[in-house]
Image: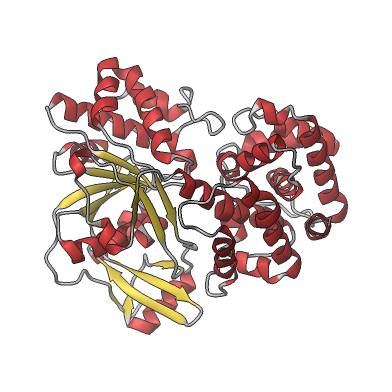
Amino acid sequence: MPADRSRLRRPDVPRAGTGIVHLGLGAFYRAHGAIYIAEAMEKSGGDWGIVGVSLVRPDQRDLLRPQDFAYTAVELGPGGEKPQIVSVISNVLVAPEDPKAVLDVLSVPTTRIVTLTVTEKGYCHEPSTGRLNRDHPDIRHDLASPGAPKSAIGFLVRALERRRAAGAKPFTVLCCDNLPENGRVVRGIVLEFAGLVDQGLAEWIEAEAAFPSTMVDRIVPATKPEDIERLADRTGVLDLSPVMHEPFRQWVVEDNFVDDLRPDLGAVGVELVLDVTPYEHMKLRCLNGTHSSLAYLGYLAGHETISDTVADPVFAAFVRRLWSNEIVPVLHAPPGVDLGAYTSSLFERYANPAIRHRTWQIAMDGSQKLPQRILGTVMESLTAGRMPRGLILAIAAWMRYVGGLDEKGQPIDVRDPLAAELRALSDGAVGAEEKVSALLGVGKIFPADLAGHAAFREALVKSYRGLIEKGAREMTKDVTNA
């Protein structure tokens, strides 16, 4: 790590007032939403500066504070790297250290939008139903401790409760996570929690607040120490918290904000629409669904990154088959979108050698991701009388992955909120049929009508057994050539 460089500092430009609070400040938002918002203010003005909130650890605050919360966003294209300094964030709060400070900034009337990237598991809900998980320890804590929430949902509801008591308008809640119909889902979870606090509060939120759905898209690989070193060598300035991203970006937002107050997002390329659902389904299923499929199968086959995986002709043919035979046939294209051209562009993005997006990173939190990314497509295919064998193989690969051992018998570092439960179920079963049956019984992931579908279950057992006997690459080849 370079030690003889001066630290990155915020550019000497006027600071915008704070209009947005972002919960879950991580690499994706800093490489996507924050850049759009900075560009919108540069183009059209407005006080839309961002206060970030870390809900768990102080790491991001501690890295950014010496830089006055500025950071470098580095575009990784086939032609080289393009860095830019982003200075739209004015402060980062750490919720466990001072939950009152977080509630205070959420409660002031100048905060007009709250954006979130807390990952699927951060909403404390049941992915298979979209309902609030009332038994989640953070939810139980937040109901009992109104002044010191832990969860994103707890902070949202308690801040809205304060605003209602003060006679202030609610803020707009803008979810930027990969959940289908994310605005509707978050609205339902918030209303359910609020109803447990005060039914009048729930009715006020339902009538006055806004929860526009969004679709976000940009590949943002994890920043590695060598990225930091390379950037410091190039610029002569040390930034300990840069973000890396691909050239492509897309943000589709339902234009539904409290009192129509928002940055001029349309001026910088955000697509403002009446209904984001077809865009969400397209992205979740075409991109995220195949990303997860390639992650589990590619990891088991020994590939470190997505670009490595699709450089293997077996997996290149496999992902194209997923799109053409299984995913696109049950999709309704958004207005003006050619799904064939869209999936071709996705393959080019996957193959970008500058994006070192690790299969292990994408494989995280699969119990939360499968219902949104893969299971919906599988259910619709089965209903239409088609057997989606490629996606079923991907589910089988996930089942093998969460068993915690790879094809060489080496341990897998499984990161998932249900990791211990899934490992215990797998370890407690003998043979492919028992393991598949045990994991299908996890109702938080698999809806009963899918888990009980006899032909699906039979195909899943066959795929799991094939992974054990032949390995991921050979099974992928078999499915592709079938």
- Display colour scheme: secondary structure
Q: Is residue 244 left or right of residue 457?
A: left
Residue 287 in which image quadrant: bottom right
Q: Is residue 243 left or right of residue 474?
A: left
Q: Position of residue 302 (x, y in %)?
A: 72, 63
Q: Position of residue 300 (x, y in %)?
A: 73, 56
Q: Residue placed farthest to the top in the image?
A: 199
Residue 211 in which image quadrant: top left
Out of 312 and 208, give the one closest to the viewer: 208
Out of 106 and 223, give the one closest to the viewer: 106
Q: Residue placed farthest to the front in the image?
A: 336
Q: Residue at x 84, y 55 (%)?
A: 482
Q: Position of residue 469 (x, y in %)?
A: 88, 51
Q: Is residue 455 left or right of residue 234?
A: right
Q: Is residue 208 above or below residue 39?
A: above
Out of 120 and 322, give the one closest to the viewer: 322
Whether residue 38 can be seen here: no
